[in-house]
Structure formats: C-alpha cells, structure tokens
Image (cartoon, coloured by chain):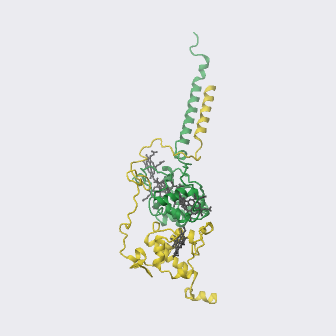
C-alpha cells in the first residue's frame, strides 16, 4: 500500500507548533508592550494654544508651582491659571509678543484660554491633589520633571499600578514638605530616603488607601 | 515555512514601525479602546458646559459672596478700611504669632518674591526682564503706609501690579502684609531689636 501521507508531512506537526508558538509569543509580547498606559499615554504632548514654557518660568525664573497652580495644596483639582495670572507679568514683560496674543484676548474678553488637558484619570477614580502634596508627595512622582519641560507631556503612566506601588510603600517617596515643589530634590541615597521616609510616615501617620473603595468611591 | 517566517517578520517590523516605542512623543490623544465608564456625564472643574451661554462648567463668583462659614463681620478685616479710610494696626480677628508669620513668609515667597525679591528690595528676577516699575519696600513712603493700604494693594492691585485676592485668602493677605512689615523692620532695625549680648559683640 502506498503511503497515505507524503514524506514532508512528517515535519508538519513540528512546524505548526513552531508557528503557533511564534505567533502566540509575538502577540503576547505585543499586547504587554502596547496595551498599557505606559505606551498609550506616556508621551502625549498636545499642541497648546499658547507656547507656554515651564522650563523658562520655573527653572530660569524660579517661580513656585503654586504661583499659578494656586489651589493644588488646597483642593482636589490643580487649577490651570487664568489669563490675569499671566498678565501680572506680561502687561510689562513682552507686552506685544504675538505668542501671547491669546492671553491678551482672554484677559480683555474674559473668555478662558482653551488649554488642552493632558492628564485625565477616568471618572470612576477619586483623586485629590491636596492630600498628596500636603503629605510630602512631590509633583515629580506623578508628573515627571515638569520644571525641565518646554512643553508639558504625559511623563508617567497614571495606571492603577503606579498609584498602588506608592500606596503600598509610601516611605520610598515621601519627602519634607518644603521640598515638595522643588522637583530637582532627591535624598542623598536610597537608604537616606528610606530612613527619612519611615520617619515621616510614622510622624505624619501616613496610611494611604489600598482597598478598592479608597479610590473607587 | 520560509514564506511564513518572511511574512511574520515583515508584519512585525511594519507594526513596530507604525506603533513606535513606549514614551515617544505624540500629538494625538491617548486611545481609549474600551472606554467603560472612563468619561461620565458629569462636569469636572475647568471643563466646558454648553448649557451656559459662556460655555463654562465653573460659574463665576457672584460679586460680594463669601465662602460658607468664613464671613467675619468686620469692615477693617475684609477691606483694610475703617469707615472708608485705610486703617492703622490690625483688625481684631488677626492674632499675630509665630505660626501667622510663617504663613506670611511662605505666601510671600510664593506670590510676591518673583517681583519684589525675597528681601523686599524690589529686585526680583523679573526686574532684569523689563519690570522696572517694581518698587522697594524700604523707603519712607512705604514705611509710613498704613497696614490697611498695603492690604488693599495686595487685594486689588495698584497701577501696574495685579490683584492677588483670587490667590490669597483674607487671612493670608493679612499674614503677607505682616511679613512685609517684618522685612521692613529687618532692613531698618532699631538698636533695641538686637539683644544686649549681641549688641556688646557688635560694639554698639
């Protein structure tokens, strides 16, 4: 009797297994690499109506975040400043700059400048700025080095993992209150940070929520 | 098999070159593939609401309204004026202690120092960029100015200086005013401001 299966069919099962493994591996790798906020959010840098530059105003001029984001330490929302805040200086500094035309228009008409929102947590998550910055969590932990950005971009992923990593080990991140707005500050070493962090966590009785209802209320 | 591997490699490279790497800058908003309840029909701070004619979800503050529970019935405290005249001294709700001075220092360094300088000499960083109108606090006119007038300048601004009442609460404005007085005193001390031992050291 002639062979029902030709000779080449001997290797077919192996080839199929190989192909399935390769495809499966590639899809898994692709999904883990791409289907996460680390890919989808990080780097989002919309074009803003005014080319406002944090590195100039914060690093070069030495302005404090709270001059503009005034309510970050008093409310859940870190406000974007109104045009009047800019006009405090820009009525005298570069008063005719074309780059600032939308600011002047807004100041005169009382209509807000339409800044494009960058960081947006889903609406089912409860987040509050004041509780964090008043407990020694610096802007840099969640927004990256804004003081060095010419244009603000989404520097951290803002996933649930990011929140929980800190909520489980706050001592790795908390710092003295007068350093919260100094984004360049770092403890001398990792041990120094842990030692300081443990002390602050104990003194301020820090106990960030890890249960679901803490953030999904 | 060779075809399979070639096509596989081709598709992988094509996908990676279209999708790019993590962290690369993008002008497009992040995709929300399963938007679940990510964006709900509620109005968050500083967002748009087409229901109102000006399109804003935040409503402007009605002039003269005060935060619930914070109103103090004291004209001097609220406006810096006593029967229409800028007042001397402090209004009764203000009690000056160390904590109050620290509050003033903190708020001064955030809000005022960029222009007026940390020591109040008027040489903040903005002077070198063209804000030459910023005055020093250390001259006779400013030393003689009433507390009420300084409070009013902080609240409502003056000529080239903007108003800061939206950034500082009434209490914080009084605290900044008090700290400003401390800066003036530190710049122009009386001999009694120094303890007697220190005076000996300095040979005064």
x, y percentage for residue B130?
Answer: 61, 67
Quadrant of the frame with the N terminus of chain A: top right
Query: Is residue B139 in sight in this rendering?
Result: yes
In this view, B4 is above or below A150? above
Count of numbered tags = 0
Find residue A5 and report its image quarter: top right
x, y percentage for residue A117?
Answer: 49, 52
x, y percentage for residue A33?
Answer: 56, 42
x, y percentage for residue A22?
Answer: 58, 32
Is A205 left or right of A91, judged from the image as shown? left
Q: Chain A rendered in what hue?
A: green
Q: Give the camera-side residue of B171 and B150.
A: B150
Question: Residue drawn at (54%, 37%), measured in percent from left and top?
Answer: A28
Question: Residue drawn at (47%, 56%), measured in percent from left and top?
Answer: A112
Question: Residue drawn at (55%, 34%), measured in percent from left and top?
Answer: A24
In this view, B67 is above or below B14? below
In this view, B7 is above or below B191? above
Find residue A34 and report its image quarter: top right
Is A82 left or right of A151, judged from the image as shown? left
Chain shaded yellow: B
Query: Is residue A80 in sight in this rendering?
Result: no
Q: Give the camera-side residue of A152 and B37.
A: A152
Is B141 left or right of B34, judged from the image as shown? right
């Amino acid at each position: 009797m002639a062979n029902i299966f030709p000779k080449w069919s001997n290797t077919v099962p192996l080839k199929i297994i190989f192909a399935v493994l390769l495809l499966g591996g590639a899809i898994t790798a692709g999904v883990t690499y791409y289907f996460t906020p680390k890919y989808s959010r990080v780097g989002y840098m919309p074009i803003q109506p005014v080319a406002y530059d944090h590195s100039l105003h914060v690093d070069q001029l030495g302005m404090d975040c709270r001059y503009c984001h005034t309510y970050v330490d008093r409310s859940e929302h870190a406000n974007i400043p109104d045009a009047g805040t800019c006009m405090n200086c820009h009525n005298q500094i570069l008063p005719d700059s074309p780059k600032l035309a939308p600011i002047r228009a807004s100041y005169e008409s009382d209509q807000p400048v339409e800044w494009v929102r960058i960081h947006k947590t889903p609406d089912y998550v409860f987040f509050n700025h004041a509780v964090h910055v008043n407990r020694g969590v610096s802007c840099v932990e969640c927004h990256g080095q804004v003081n060095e950005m010419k244009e603000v971009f989404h520097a951290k992923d803002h996933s649930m993992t990011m929140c929980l990593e800190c909520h489980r080990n706050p001592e790795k991140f908390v710092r003295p209150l007068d350093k919260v707005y100094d984004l360049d500050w770092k403890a001398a070493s990792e041990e120094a940070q842990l030692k300081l962090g443990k002390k602050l966590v104990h003194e301020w009785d820090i106990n960030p929520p890890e249960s679901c209802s803490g953030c999904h209320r | 098999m060779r075809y399979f591997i070639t096509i596989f490699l081709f598709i992988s490279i094509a996908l990676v070159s279209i999708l790019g790497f993590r962290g690369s800058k993008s002008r497009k908003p992040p995709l929300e593939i399963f938007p679940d309840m990510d964006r709900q029909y509620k109005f968050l701070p500083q967002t748009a609401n087409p229901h109102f004619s000006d399109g804003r979800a935040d409503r402007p503050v009605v002039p003269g309204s005060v935060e619930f529970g914070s109103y103090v019935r004291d004209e001097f405290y609220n406006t810096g004026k006593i029967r229409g005249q800028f007042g001397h001294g402090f209004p009764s709700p203000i009690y000056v202690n160390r904590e109050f001075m620290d509050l003033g220092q903190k708020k001064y360094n955030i809000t005022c120092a960029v222009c007026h300088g940390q020591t109040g000499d008027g040489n903040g960083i903005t002077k070198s960029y063209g804000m030459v109108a910023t005055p020093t606090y250390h001259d006779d006119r400013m030393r003689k100015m009433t507390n009420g007038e300084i409070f009013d300048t902080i609240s409502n601004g003056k000529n080239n200086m903007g108003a800061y009442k939206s950034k500082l609460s009434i209490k914080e404005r009084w605290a900044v005013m008090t700290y400003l007085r401390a800066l003036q005193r530190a710049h122009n001390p009386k001999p009694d401001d120094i303890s007697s031992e220190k005076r000996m050291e300095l040979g005064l």
